[in-house]
Amino acid sequence: MQEISINNVNFYYTSPYKEIFNNLNININKNWKTGIIGKNGRGKTTLLKLLLNELVPSKGNIANNSNFIYFPFKTLKIKNVFEYIKQNIAPYKEWESKMEHYLQKPTEENLKKYDKILERYMFNNGYKINGIIEREIQEIGLKKEILDKSMCNLSGGEITKINIVILFQKKEKFPLIDEPTNHLDMEGREILASYLGKKEGFIMVSHDRYFLDLACDHIISLNKHTIDIKNTDFSGWEKAHEIKLHEENSKDFKIKKEIKSLKKQADQQSKWSNSREKDKQGSRGDKGAIGASAAKLMKKSILAKRNINNKISEKQKLLKDKEKEYKLKFRITEKSPSQILEIRNLNISYDDQVVLNNFNLDIKKGDKIAITGKNGSGKTSIIKAIFNQIKYKGHIHYPSFLKINHLKQIPEWQSGLLKDKVSEKGYDYEEFRNLLGSLNIRDGILEKDISDYSEGEKKKVEIAKSLIEEYDLYIWDEPLNYIDMQTRKIIEEAILEFNPTILFIEHDRYFVENIATNIVEL
């Protein structure tokens, strides 16, 4: 059995200091379709970079004989799609040119060189690669006509699929896949997940629950202090995790009760030893005998208290993976009108291409409307039309006093100190910090420049901006890109509790099905 073995690995970041792994031990079978999950900042991408040797552990080692390849990866810049795929898999053109040259001058030395290149060429399916590319392109949900196109004419989702095809055709490479779904629509995610589900041997980081169900047969969860590995898809892991949480809640209640009792004993010991000291000071008898007796009692008291504190420490260690539960709150304008927004006969075209034709939509107070559809179907164009950012024909009406929040796909703040940005906007800094805390962002991040934030951290800052003020209508364009599962659930729970009016685009099927009161499919 081929395994990737991670042994007693410690790793931490500096500036500011942040411990990521402490005595990390994992064995991963290379035949597993492994999904890695965990909160933002828990170390998912760090783990991939440790495997790639881009980061070095401060302690421990990683034993494997794999030649890893990381997605997304750097590619050769070639215009034609077919040649882009082929040449990014292996240097076929170079090999073909060299073999032709050696055959034209068939000396003994040249024929030896020819044989060596031919061996590599055949090992990399050189004579079959054209057919393999056509087959794989169709397997991943693209039409073979795309092979004749130019790379500059492709969507982000199409490029993602093409690069995944390349990833699995590179010989003797073990794929490490980091967040492959961010440019894909809901249908595209399902097709990609099905494609991955037919492959063997990869490690993938993803926050899309439905995608993980379709693609993976093992789940590694990076918890607060431990690592949890399950031979199942995400839903199976989640059920087991809920049972574990229920057991931990019962255990936590008992442990906390024991800790409370021990702390009470420690306080009593302190009071008792203090009273003995006062007796010594107030006594009129043999000072030496009384002093020696009091000293023994004091020593006994200190040892007893130390033992109690050690027990408290041991009990606290048992409360390992119980995550703190956070809650979000939407600040909704109290006197929002019942009719929020009306769209009639909306027509949008780019050059001569019709994107939307006679589109109609009514949004009433409390509606949570999801717009779904393939990439390029006009989802974001509707939002741009509402904010008058593009030309359109038709009628879009909402009251002039309506307060609308626009959460964009790409966060507005990309550099600078967060404190300065918050001050410029006139937000209450402490309140903003509390919102970030509810979104699972710790204070350490406030010391870094926003340009050093992860994509998930930038997105959480953007969500905090949405929740800091009162609004009548929230328009959110793919709010969950890079957001971890726990935070997704926190956002879902807040929406269901506070019932804001939302028009949103999202490709996380679970999220859409959980909160949408109406789904508009383009």
Image (cartoon, rainbow, N blue to C red):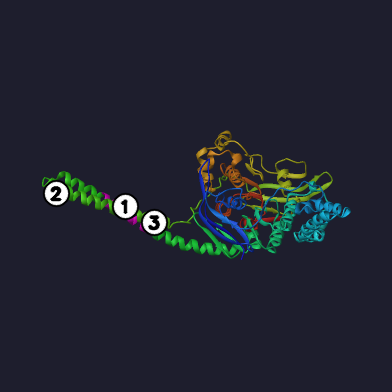
Majority secondary structure in the magenta region: helix
Q: Which residue is mark 2?
A: 289
Q: Is residue 155 left or right of residue 413?
A: right
The N terminus appears in which quarter of the rendering? bottom right
* Residue furthest left as drawn: 285
* Residue furthest front as drawn: 108
Mark with earlier residue (2, 3): 2
Front position in the image: 135 or 522: 135
> What distance separates the C-alpha of mark 2 from that of mark 1?
26 Å
- The picture places residue 189, in percent across and down from the top left corner, at 69, 57
Q: Which residue is mark 3?
A: 314
Q: Which residue is mark 1?
A: 306
In this picture, which residue range is highlighted in magenta?
A: 256-270
Secondary structure found at label 2: helix
Q: Nearer the viewer, mark 2 or mark 1?
A: 2
Q: Amino acid at mark 1?
A: Arg
Q: Is residue 309 magenta?
A: no
Secondary structure found at label 3: helix
Q: Residues within 10 Å of mark 2 (few under 14, many from 20)?
A: few
Q: Amino acid at mark 2?
A: Ala
